[in-house]
Every structure is written in structure tokens, then in C-alpha cells.
Image (cartoon, rainbow, N blue to C red):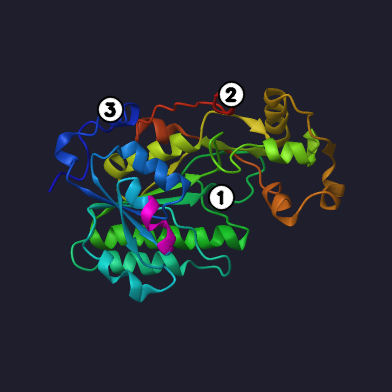
Amino acid sequence: MPALRSPHPQLYASRPGALPSRFRRERVLLVGCGDIGLRVARELGGRVRLLALTSNPARVPELRQRGITPLTGDLDRPASLQRLGGLATRVVHLAPPPDAGRTDPRTLALTRVLRRRSHPQSLVYGSTSGVYGDCQGDWVDENRPVNAFTTRAQRRVHAERLVRHFGRATGAVSSILRIPGIYAPDRVGGTPRERLQKGTPVLRSEDDVFTNHIHADDLARACVAALWGGGPQRITNVNDDTVLKMGDYFDLAADLYGLPRPVRVPRSTAADHLSLMLLSFMSESRRMVNARLKSELRLRLRYATVATGLAT
């Protein structure tokens, strides 16, 4: 079996086609093979055997066409996951928790079955920056304690604990990626264009919050870099270099698309114009530090700012 870490993970991070030949026979399991999972598969470029868990039989032909071996199973039905034990040498877990509760039974079911027989050498979990809660605009690195306010974020905290416990119990390298807002022009709903066209307002500057971003392709590359270059039980912020408040982000996008800038409203009347979901995102402000992403995973961002990514 190959070593847990590539001797030159920085080469792969900057050159997607440069996966060392001794890794080509590895089996990488994608759990949650949506947009980001498919981008991870594309980054791997056929150099490994790709497997994907799907609960939707209708996706089987699509996955096969992309060179991915589909495995039918449902994280909500643990009995359907038995064949996953000992199957993959590395796992990328991008499946979200359920929509209710404060725990993530899906990650619990997955980590239990992965511990059976031979466990994978590495497990990468896609979490959320929401576990930090509201930081009132402070700079936030990975040493900051979690302070999840919403039940959505609390489910992610529980999943992170399960992933770290899996790593400690098995010796596998379990990497946690804390992900902010994902965008990409070729991603469904991946740009602010639709919201701008609807004329959805944003908060005025004095009430606004800092927001963080990562291009979908850079996120996929971070997942792959962590598969071979992640540290044991290591947490990494996966965000670009952009430092913008949310309203400024939408102003930037409006100017790029030639659309009117959104109306600014005070927080006191925001509930009259915005959904509860949008209001929840506007209640947390932080500026994420991505030094570990660059120094440890050695990822060179293709889209260092949203201005670059949206204009591409």
C-alpha cells in the first residue's frame, strides 16, 4: 500500500494531472457526489479508481459515463452501507446532515461501516464555516473554538467530532475542511446573478457582515490535496483571499453583470424583505484566515478573489 502522504502534495495541488503513478491503483470513494464531488472526480482525472455512493438509481448511468463506479446505498439506511467496509483506500465525505436535529446520524453510519475490515488511509470531510458562529467581523483561524448557533451548524459540529474520533480510533488521517460560500459560474445557483435580477436587497454598510467565499474548482482541489497531504485530525479553512462585506460582494457582481446594484436596507427592517434563511446568514460575520490551506495543503488558488472567479 502507498504511504499515507504524498511526498510532494504541493505538485498535485498546482498541477491536477501530476498524481504520482504509485497512487494510480488506489480506490477513492465519493460520498455525496453532487457538483463538488464530480469536480473532485474531474481533478483526479482517472488516475485512481473512482467509486461513488448514490441513493438515486437514476444517477447510475451518469456516474458510469463519467468513469465512476456507482454503489447504491442510503446514509439514512445503515444496513444498505455494508459493502462499503474495506472497499476504498481513501474517502471524500461531502454528504450533508439531515435537515433536522442537532446530530448527524449519516456521518455516524458512515464512520461505523468504514471501521469494519480494513479502514481507509484518509478521510476528508467537507464541513462548514458556520461552526464558528458569529465572530463579529474578527479574523478567524482554525484554533478558534466552535460556537455554532444554528442547529444546521450544530449538526456539522457533531459530524466533525465523529470524523476526528474515527481518525483517532483507526489511525486514519481524517481531515476536516471548513467551507464558506461556494460559487462558480458553471454551478447551479453558483453566482449572485439570479438574486440580483430579483432585486433582493442587502444590508446597509453599517449593519452588514463580512462574508467568505471559495470557487468550486478550488474547493475540489483542496479536497484532493487533503486526501494525500492532510494532517491527522487536522482542520483547515478553505476560503479565498477576498475580504468583502456581503453587500459589497453583490455590488461587485452587479457591476460585472451590468445589473443594478441591490437596494440597501437597515437591519431593523430587513425581516420585511428577506427570508429567514437569508437573515440567518446575515447574522454572522467573520473573516476567515486561509494560511493553513496554503502552507500545509500547499494549495495555490486558481481564483484568489471572487472578482477573478466571477469574471472568468
Residue 58 highlighted magenta (yes or no): yes
- Name the side, left or right, on which 187 lies relative to 173: right
Image quadrant where residue 23 sits: top left
In the rendered structure, find residue 132 and report the number of the disc placed on it.
1
Q: Nearer the viewer, residue 144 or 297?
A: 297
Residue 72 position, x and y percent, is 35, 65
Q: Nearer the viewer, residue 183 or 286?
A: 183
Q: Nearer the viewer, residue 183 or 9?
A: 183
Residue 30 position, x and y percent, is 35, 53
Q: Nearer the viewer, residue 101 or 171?
A: 101
Residue 194 position, x and y percent, is 69, 40
In the rendered structure, find residue 311 and report the number of the disc placed on it.
2
User: Badge 1: how crowded within 10 Å, few (<14), some, or many (20+)?
Assistant: many
Q: Magenta region: which residues?
A: 56-62
Image quadrant where residue 199 sits: top right
Q: Residue at x 21, y 62 (%)?
A: 86
Q: Secondary structure at mark 2?
A: helix
Q: Is residue 225 at all visible to an observer of this figure?
A: no
In the rendered structure, find residue 11 and report the number of the disc placed on it.
3
User: How far apart in space, not on screen, are marks 2 and 1 (Cα)?
Assistant: 30 Å
